[in-house]
Amino acid sequence: MTPATGQLLEVEVGPVAHGGHCVARHDGRVVFVRHALPGELVRVRITEDSGGSYCRGDAVEILRAAPDRVAPPCPWSGPGRCGGCDFQHVSADAQRLLKAFVVREQLARLGGLPDVQVVVEELPGGPLGWRTRMQFAVDRRGRAGLRRHRSHSVVPVRDCPIAHPALDVPSVLGRRWPGARNVEVIGSADVPRAVRRHGQWGSSLVEGPVVGRERAAGRDWQVGHDAFWQVHPAAASVLSACVLDLLAPRPGERCLDLYGGVGLYAAVLAEVVGPDGSVLCVEGHAVAAADATVNLAGTPWASVREAAVDGALVSGLPAYDLVVLDPPRSGAGRDVCQALAAGPARVIAYVACDPAALARDVRIFGDAGWRLAGLRAFDLFPMTHHVECVALLHPE
């Protein structure tokens, strides 16, 4: 019988799945359960049911708890509340084990690689107070908050435990924002706070510097407020060091930085390959490409091309030895992967924020004769299901 939305079911919780939920079964149907842990016995309230092969629900009563269950540090976390975090009820060590399981499962199921060992590495600073960029939705009454899971409903919160203290989130949430759709706040220990209001007719800077600045990898970076930058304060330094370690660039080599953003990987690669080498940063977002041009201005052997990566590959790129690519959540896709696999690179580093997209693209490379030669994973987003991976690809 198909359960109706709101119905309570008692289920034994199975393994964690990609997306921040666990898999259970009831009367032959899959139930994706949030706020649960593998091995638990829980009472689930159905939140969505389209009548197909699966439904979704929240664990509203824990009948048998797993050893890794903890009290959520956030009072707004839980069924029917803020949907921003997935694992507030899970110990920090167990969160990383769950994420490692998901990466392995995706590589096995979508990538055809059943034996990849995955360890999700912890970043400094702990699981709270790390997020340096927050965007709050605004309801019709002008109250800022965070949305419920898979909903447009806004939960008016007073604070966010994963936000960096420099954001001073209570001061943003404690005022009204009439006419705004959302409010964005950016800042860290090294970066002055900036607050931006986004409305129907555009955005405006409420507080802070006009030009964004960040510090990572031992230097300062210009990062426009509309450009992408990792939200964990240690992420950019950790990822750039990982890319250098895996690629092992040599003086004089020629490098491509695809989906290059503000030029983070291009700059650190340029320092190693030196003036006898070259680095081309390809970025399709105009603000990020402009920032990359500024950030690489002191390195004449590094250049920036504002273009979509797939278009740049079709139109032609200079000769290259190394590639690093950091595509959006949807991944690089078949056309880009096949073009790179047919190219002259001796090694490729693929930075991925979605393990499913990574696994799919690794399989495309594999079908073209490349192999996964190494993988590192990082817990850049504690309390959430998100995990960052860096894959090293070698031609056979």
Image: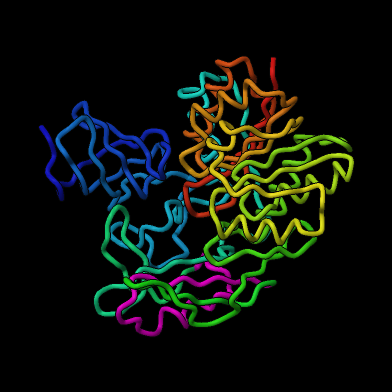
370 or 282, which is in the foreground? 282
* Viewer-nearest residue: 169 or 359: 359
Toward the viewer: 8 or 167? 167
Q: Is residue 273 left or right of residue 365?
A: right
**The N terminus lies in which quarter of the figure?**
top left
Quarter of the image where one finds residue 378: top right
Which residue occupies 65% across, 49% down?
Answer: 122
Q: Which residues are magenta?
A: 161-189
> Would you place residue 142 above or below residue 311 in this image?
below
**Residue 96 on image: x %, y %:** 56, 44
x and y, in percent, of residue 376 in the image: 66, 37
| 237 on left or right of 76 | right
**Residue drawn at (45%, 80%) of the image:** 172
Quarter of the rendering containing residue 104: top right
Please tell me which residue is depicted at 39% across the width and 46% down the height of the picture.
65
Q: Quadrant of the C terminus?
A: top right
Its colouring scheme is: rainbow
Whole-percent x, y for residue 329 in the image = 48, 43
Is residue 175 a member of the stretch shown in magenta?
yes
Q: How many marks?
A: 0
Residue 328, given in percent of the width and then of the height, sits at 51, 44
Q: Which of the pair 391/378 is nearer the observer?
A: 391
